[in-house]
Image (cartoon, rainbow, N blue to C red):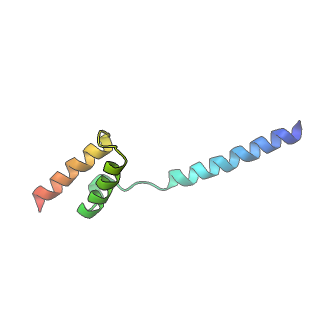
Amino acid sequence: MAEEQTIKTEGQTSDGAVQGEQKSQKKKKINKLSLDDINKKLDILVQASQIKSKYYQHLVQRKNELQVQA
């Protein structure tokens, strides 16, 4: 019984470590992305059928802002 408990706690810590690694990789802010990066991300979202997401909408808005400035 004690062995089973230690195995469970070991498995939980390894999962937590993996999640911690994923959380440490932050996404770049939309305002800091270049126009090329925005286009790549938009293509990925279109292929994944995520055109209704807020992230997609914000990327489109930022793309329009960058095109007006140029």
Q: Position of residue 32 (x, y in %)?
A: 29, 58
Instruction: Return the x and y of residue 70 as percentages of the image width and height.
Output: 11, 63
Which residue is located at x 29 percent, y 46 percent?
A: 56
Q: Is residue 32 above or below residue 56?
A: below
| Rendered image quadrant of residue 33 | bottom left
Q: Residue 54 sits in which quadrant?
A: top left
25 above or below 12? below
| Residue 15 in the figure: left or right of residue 31 | right
Going by the image, does 70 lie left or right of 55?
A: left
Counting the numbered discs, the total is 0
Residue 21: % across, % down: 56, 54
Report the front residue among 27 and 55. 55
Q: Residue at image x 68%, y 50%?
A: 14
Q: Residue at x 51, y 50 (%)?
A: 23
Q: To which quarter of the image does residue 67 belong?
A: bottom left
- Taking 55 as reference, is 22 left or right? right
Q: Camera-side residue: 50 or 66? A: 50
From the viewer's side, name the closer residue of 40 and 1: 40
Could you tell whether 18 is left or right of 63 in the image? Answer: right
Q: Quadrant of the N terminus?
A: top right
Residue visible at 30% across and 55% down? 43
**Residue lying farthest top?**
1
